[in-house]
Image (cartoon, rainbow, N blue to C red):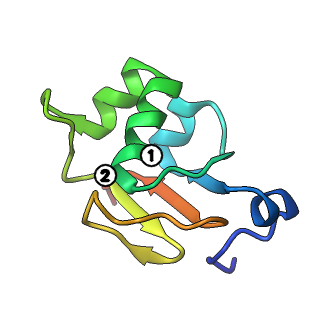
Amino acid sequence: MEVGLVNSEKCRTEKMIEVRFLTVLREIAGERTAVIEKKESISLLIEYLCQRYGEKFRDTVIKGEKGALKEHVKIQLNGEEVNNPDTRIHDGSLVILFVPVAGG
């Protein structure tokens, strides 16, 4: 599977992005993929997703009341891991959110 900018015509012509949920976040969100209006930064996207998917989603990705991401939550933006919540998101971007699965 190629990871990169979204190929959807809607995402290219409007200010949209694609968000993919993997592992437990897929179960909580109730969907694998969401095409949504672009948010300016990763932090604003996470804030929006917490509102959209509710308390269980928020409890899984956010620690404390200040809104910092939990260390185990991984975010990729167009195939690159993102650690800075102020990272800008561009039109047509692909954001992948997941919690790594441990075990053997």
Q: Is residue 78 above or below residue 45?
A: below
Image-quadrant location for residue 75: bottom left
Q: Which residue is more in the foreground, 94 or 72?
A: 94
Query: How many residues crowd mark 2 within 10 Å: few (<14), some (14–19), many (20+)?
Result: some
Query: How many residues crowd mark 1 within 10 Å: few (<14), some (14–19), many (20+)?
Result: some
- Looking at marks 1 and 2 on the same chain, the residue that comes earlier in the sequence is marked by 1
Q: Which residue is more in the foreground, 26 or 84?
A: 84
**Residue occupying image coordinates x 13% and y 34%:** 66
Q: Where does the N terminus fall, quadrant-wise?
A: bottom right
Q: Position of residue 82 (x, y in %)?
A: 34, 69
User: Looking at numbered disc 1 in the image, what kind of residue is underneath it?
Assistant: Leu
Q: Which residue is more in the foreground, 60 or 89?
A: 89
Number of callouts: 2
Q: Is residue 78 above or below residue 59?
A: below
Which residue position is annotated with label 1?
A: 45
- Picture disc at residue 73: 2
Considering the numbered disc 2 on the image, is that residue within a helix, a strand or a loop? loop
Q: Is residue 16 above or below residue 61?
A: below
On the rendered structure, is 65 left or right of 11?
Answer: left
Can residue 4 be seen here? The reply is: yes
**Residue occupying image coordinates x 12% and y 30%:** 64
Q: CA distance from mark 1 to mark 2?
A: 14 Å
- Picture disc at residue 94: none
Q: Which residue is more in the foreground, 60 or 100?
A: 60
User: Looking at numbered disc 2 in the image, what kind of residue is underneath it?
Assistant: Val
**Residue occupying image coordinates x 46% and y 35%:** 48
Q: Position of residue 61 (x, y in %)?
A: 31, 39
**Residue occupying image coordinates x 63% and y 77%:** 4
